[in-house]
Image (cartoon, rainbow, N blue to C red):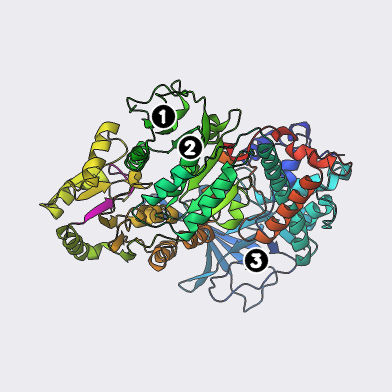
Amino acid sequence: MIQLTQSLDQLDWIPRPKLTALRRLGIETVEDVVTHFPFRYEDRRTFARFPSEESDVPICLCGEVVKTRLLRFGGWKKIFEATLQESEANALSQPLVLRWFNLHYVQRMIATGQRLVVFGKPRLRGRRICMEHPEFEIIETNDEISMHFGRITPIYPATEGLPQRTLRGLIYRLLKDLDKESVETLLPTGIDLGERVSALQKIHFPASQEDIGPAREHLVFAEFFAMQLLIASRRSAASNRHGKAHCGNGALLQKFVDGLPFDLTKAQKRVIDELQHDLATNRPMNRLLQGDVGSGKTVVAITAMLLAVEAGFQAALMAPTQILAEQHYAVLCRWLEPLGVKISLRTGDRREENFLPLISGNGAPDILVGTHALLYEGVSFENLGLSVIDEQHKFGVSQRARLTAREPAPDVLVMTATPIPRTLTMTVYGDLDVSVIDEMPANRGKVITAVRDRSKLGEVLTFMRSRLEAGQQAYVIYPLIDESDKLDVKAAAAEFDTWCERLRPFRCELLHGRIPAAEKQAIMDRFRRGKTTTLISTTVIEVGVDVPNATVMLIENAERFGLAQLHQLRGRIGRGKHKSYCVLLSDGESPETVAKLAVLERTSDGFEVAEADWEMRGPGDLLGTAQSGLPALKLGNLRTDARIMREARAAAIALLDADPELQAPDNQRFQQLIVEERGRTFSGVS
């Protein structure tokens, strides 16, 4: 019998070249194979008749190849055609023409007399019904009929050298010879979704369509439960760390708030109360602060730092870029130095004179602002009470851990201006308490977003000049620094001189990531002071740049940016009292591009944008399993399976609350899911 944990190398009946192909799919063990799940199914119990008209719905057909031919055009273009006849053809039957363009391997595979199963969309080409580049399988022997025909047939993600028939045959044989005792069901007591071995059999080779749903429910629940058990374990480990209270009496905080030139929103006040409560306990704070661009997260973070400083501790604020770190430093100096708070800056290129020493004493800073340089170059905090990490998703786990992994544990506040759908918050940040600023300050100008094609550039330029003449400023954003031979995309450096001519006599400057840090800072300083009216830039200004007088943003080749990134860029305007305007310049005509840009025209709510982004492209980078340390999901979908995720999360938390060390006889089987993670902290922020 074959064991679930067995390596495929130990099975001598698998050809060595197939092992190489399997490794390309990340498959090395029997368990890897049987958890390589189908992405769709074909009902091959009965086949549809060959169509007489085209359709946008793909169909599955079976027939015999009666003719093949190779057509050549211009010496390099080749079209291979195979004419398929249905098995029980009659006088009225119309053959189906299969066509492949410049795919030489298909020509070598398909021959007259073969029996094929094809899947694709029938299209009318002249008077012929064709399928172009269909998926296909060749059925070679009658022995394969039971595996590939007369059933609901699974279709898998495959790779070169590993066709569907081979992959399906391998999974079929392994499931048939698998030692059922080696397949443990890892579901908590009270969750009755059947046995795992049965779910695996039915997800791959269902007897009916009705088998698939319950099998998938079992496997997705188990996948989510394992993930949530790991998250809950990490949360428990973080809360058990030794910490201190880092909360002053609030007098300094109140002095700061009273001196602000604006009133805090109700959402900001609510979050400040949550932070004050966390800082006053001995349990290390582990809190995520979500807020849309411009919602006032920085002010809230400052109040937390002041509470720590007032209690006699240091605070650190780490930002992902030098531009953002320098901006934070300038803001903190302006607001806090009048209160007697000492602030220092450390980036890769800059060190303020009052930076050292970092240990407690008259010369030590109360608040240290910096980039990842805070982690290196001999920086050694001896009295760190609070770590604030801005735009935390731009840092790696090891970088965050290096700042925060010390005893006694500092309180930690991580901030993001990229709103995260709730189901993702339960996973990627499942070990953190979450605060949300869901209200925008009243003094912010409205941002109007419009999509325009390049034929309207003249009108856009006229509008931009009118704003500049009114004393306001603008950004022009490009996806690239330099022109590319491979991409038909505009570039900032190449277009800079053109913009200088277009906007003369107004002063333009160029900003991108390859400009030396000191020069970059000088450019930003001139723009903030209004010496420069228009900044021609790449996405280096995406995060945190705050110039209230900038009211116009033109984004070239907007189709080249992601939805969340476009929203972040747009957040650089509308930061003052004036109405602001974001123009998305794009000639992209694909349905995806049109739908993406329409979202930004429709709403300026970052949470709506995040949900739309997730729906359009799936979790993608948002899940961040490589950074979070979570296993990648093989079957579960965090958006469509949100109900199962919530149920799995509740079951995992209840289990660990009742049995934190998983010592009960029925719970010891779950230790394998988290034992190797004990002592590690989820998100690397505790």
Question: Nearer the viewer's eye, disc 1 or disc 2?
Answer: 2
Question: Nearer the viewer's eye, disc 2 or disc 3?
Answer: 2
Q: Is residue 524 left or right of residue 247?
A: left
Q: Is mark 2 on a helix, strand or loop?
A: helix
- Nearest the viewer among 418 and 367 is 367
Residue in view at x 23 percent, y 65 percent: 456
Q: Name the residue under label 1.
A: 365
Q: Can residue 216 be seen in this view?
A: yes
Q: Name the residue under label 2.
A: 310
Q: Is residue 495 left or right of residue 417?
A: left
| Residue 61's disc number | 3
Q: What element carries label 3?
A: strand
Query: Is residue 507 highlighted in magenta?
Result: no
Q: Distance between the residues labelled 1 and 2?
A: 13 Å
Residue in view at x 75 percent, y 61 percent: 212
| Residue 335's disc number | none
- Nearest the viewer among 56 and 503 is 503
Disc 3 marks a residue whose amino acid type is: Leu
Q: Choose the circle earlier in sequence order: 2 or 3.
A: 3
Q: How far apart are marks 2 and 3 (CA)?
A: 74 Å
Residue in view at x 80 percent, y 54 percent: 199
Mark 3 residue crowding within 10 angstroms, few (<14) / some (14–19) / many (20+) = many
Query: Is residue 478 highlighted in magenta?
Result: yes
Disc 1 marks a residue whose amino acid type is: Pro
